[in-house]
Image: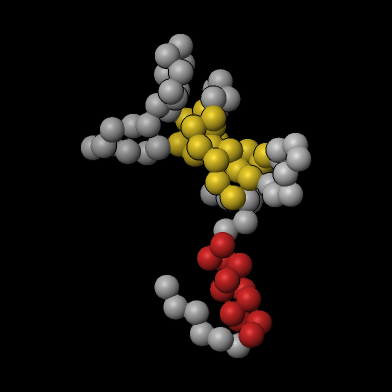
């Protein structure tokens, strides 16, 4: 599964394949979806882009994260500088 929101339609579908665990559900009482997607956000008056994790059915936002993964950026910078990067 691709996590790059710039590929395809701009969103990434996330579907839980759990069998023995509770499944995440949309927080809206009128929606019982268990499918979520990551959608690129560009808030007004913001210098940064974000990913909204939202219900794939109704669009209710359940979380927001930075568009750029900090660890990936640090690894790339360390590689350019020739500095080992360990987790």
Give the residue drawn at x 70%, y 49%. 48
Q: Nearer the viewer, residue 2 or 36?
A: 36
Left or right: where does residue 79 sit relative to residue 32?
right
Quadrant containing the C terminus is: bottom left
Residue 71 vertical placement versus 21 (above, below)? below
Quarter occupied by residue 37:
top right
The number of numbered badges drawn on the structure is 0
Which residue occupies the extreme top position in the image? Answer: 30
Residue 37 vertical placement versus 72 (above, below)? above
Give the residue drawn at x 57%, y 66%. 72
Give the residue drawn at x 51%, y 85%. 84
Give the residue drawn at x 63%, y 38%. 39
Left or right: where does residue 46 sit relative to residue 70?
right
Q: Nearer the viewer, residue 30 or 9?
A: 30
Give x and y (percent) for residue 32. 42, 18
User: Is residue 36 in view from this perspective?
Assistant: no
Q: Nearer the viewer, residue 74 or 22?
A: 74
The colour scheme is: secondary structure
Residue 71 vertical placement versus 24 (above, below)? below
User: Is residue 81 in view from this perspective?
Assistant: yes
Give x and y (percent) for residue 80. 66, 82
């Amino acid at each position: 599964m691709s996590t790059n929101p710039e590929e395809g339609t701009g969103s990434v579908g996330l579907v839980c394949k759990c069998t023995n665990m509770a499944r995440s559900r949309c927080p809206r009482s009128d929606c019982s979806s268990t499918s979520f997607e990551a959608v690129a956000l560009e808030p007004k008056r913001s210098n940064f882009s974000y990913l909204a994790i939202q219900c794939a059915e109704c669009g209710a936002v359940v979380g927001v994260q930075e568009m750029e993964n900090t660890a990936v950026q640090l690894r790339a910078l360390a590689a350019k500088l020739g500095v080992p990067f360990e987790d």
